[in-house]
Every structure is written in structure tokens, then in C-alpha cells.
Image (spheres, helix red, strand yellow):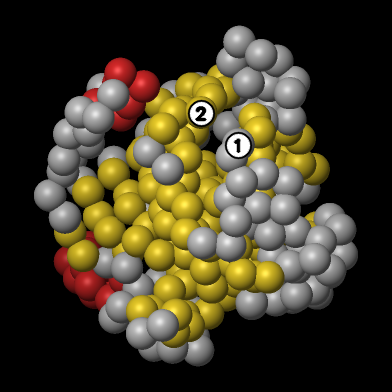
Amino acid sequence: MKTSLIFLISILFFYNCKPIKPTENNKSATNQVRKNFESKYDTLFDFENNEKGKLPVGWSQYFTGRGKITDWKIVDDKGNKVLAQLSQDRPNYHFNDIVFDDLSIKNIELEVRMKGVDGDMDQGGGFIWRFTDKNNYYVVRANPLEDNVVLYKVKNGRRTDLPVVGKGRTYGVDVSPLGHGWNKLGLVVQDDLFSVFLNGNEIFQVKDNTFTKAGKIGLWTKADAVTYFDDFRVKY
């Protein structure tokens, strides 16, 4: 049984990702937290081996809050396969979740390229981590409509923004205009400290101990945000 389970997980990783060599980020002192993050595994989900019009193999979709649907699929973006959230369901308190089923982890480094394509109520999106179910997890998201990045906890289905280290309850941080092109969101999770990066630069940190155990990782959007994600890098 154990051998069969290991074989199945290996197959799921083959269809979703490819290994890449770990690299040390020496660009600036602001990335010191990344250099201090010790990892044994470095994996890239580029979604190229997945079938268009379907969920990627080994992933599950959920939604938190009001509404009826969420719609994650592999789509073609100018000859490149990407993971997209396509539902334009518009209840205000509606969050689209997708998580990778076969990894439960506590400390991790995440990075993804993302592009806000459409959405009147909301755009953009970000990461989920320490996900136990659709009502309990952490999330950090970048929003091109508001040009800010905010980190939240979702506990028992209720989303609450968390204070920024050294600044308090500021509703995240404002950033330069994100536009409709690709941006790179990054996150380093080390116990109760979460360091957030945008386009290679650390922009803020949050400390919180609501969820202290390992959980699943994934991606997230809100309401009618149609967002494309690609090159989802996972180090742990």
C-alpha cells in the first residue's frame, strides 16, 4: 500500500511540475530572509503537461463564503498554458480557492507569476497556505484595482486582515500600479513570520499564530476576478 501511494504521488508531480535547481538570491539585503530559508525541495508548476479546459491533475477547487460556483481551468495564453480562475460570480463575500492535494507543509517559500485579466468587483489574487478546509487558511493577495497587497487569515469562514510588522492595522501596503500585465508575488513562511515579496522586493511582514500546523498550499481569487497564474514555484 505504501509503495503504491508513493508511486501515485510521483505521477501527480510529473503531470503538474518539473524540478529546478535551488538558487541563492543575492540581489539585495531585502532578500536576506529568502537566503536564510533552508529547503530540500524546489519545484515548479508550469502547467504545460495538463489538459486545457480541465483542472490540473492532483488539484481540488473550493469556494469560501457566498455564491454557488468557482471555475479553475487550464487555458491557453498566447501559446502558453496557464492556470486560470474564470468564474465571474459576483457575491461580495466569495473567495475562489484551489489547492494541491498531495502536499501538507508548515514552512515554505512560494512564488508565482499572476495577471489580472478581468473583474469589475475584484481582480488579482494570491497564495493560500496552511489550508485545512475551505473556511480555515491564510491568504495573501495583490489587487490591481486597489494597487495594494494584503495578508489575511480566514478562520471559520471569516476573513480578517492582519497587522503589518512595525505598522499595525494598515490594510496591507499600497504598491506601484500593477496594471494588466504579469507581476510576481512571493511569500516566505517561517513558523509565525510571513514575509511578502512583490516583483522580487520584500514589501512587508506579518506575525500570526492562528494556524500553527501544517496545511495545504494553493491559489486564491475573490468574487469575479478572472486571473491567470503561471510558474508556481514551491520550495520546502
Numbered mark located on residue 203 in the image: 2
- Upstream in sequence: badge 2 or badge 1: 1
* Residue 28 in picture, x, y percent from top left: 28, 24
Q: Residues within 10 Å of mark 2 (few under 14, many from 20)?
A: some
Q: Nearer the viewer, residue 30 or 93?
A: 30
Q: Nearer the viewer, mark 2 or mark 1?
A: 1
Numbered marks: total:
2
Mark number displayed over residue 2: none
Front-lying residue, 147 or 96: 147
Q: Quadrant of residue 220?
A: bottom right
**Helix or strand or loop: what does disc 1 sit on?**
loop
Left or right position of 137 against 63: left
Res. 175 mark: 1
Residue drawn where x is 53% and y is 57% of the image: 219
Amino acid type for the residue under numbered disc 1: Val
Counting from the top left corner in percent of width and height, residue 41 is at 20, 46
Residue at (86, 58) in percent of width and height: 92
Within 10 angstroms of label 1, few (less than 14), some, or many (20 or more) residues? some
Cβ–Cβ under 8 Å for marks 2 and 1: yes
Distance from label 2 to label 1 (Cα)?
A: 9 Å
Disc 2 is placed on an element classified as: strand
Question: Is 161 situated above or below 192?
Answer: below
Query: Which amino acid lies under the numbered mark 2 shown in the image of this protein?
Result: Ile
Q: Is residue 69 above or below residue 109?
A: below
The x and y percentages for residue 151 are: 63, 36
Q: Is residue 11 shown above or below 62? A: below
Q: From this viewpoint, is residue 38 visible?
A: no
User: Most extreme residue toward the left, as rendered?
Assistant: 21
Q: Which residue is pictured at 73% across the width and 46% down the height?
A: 146
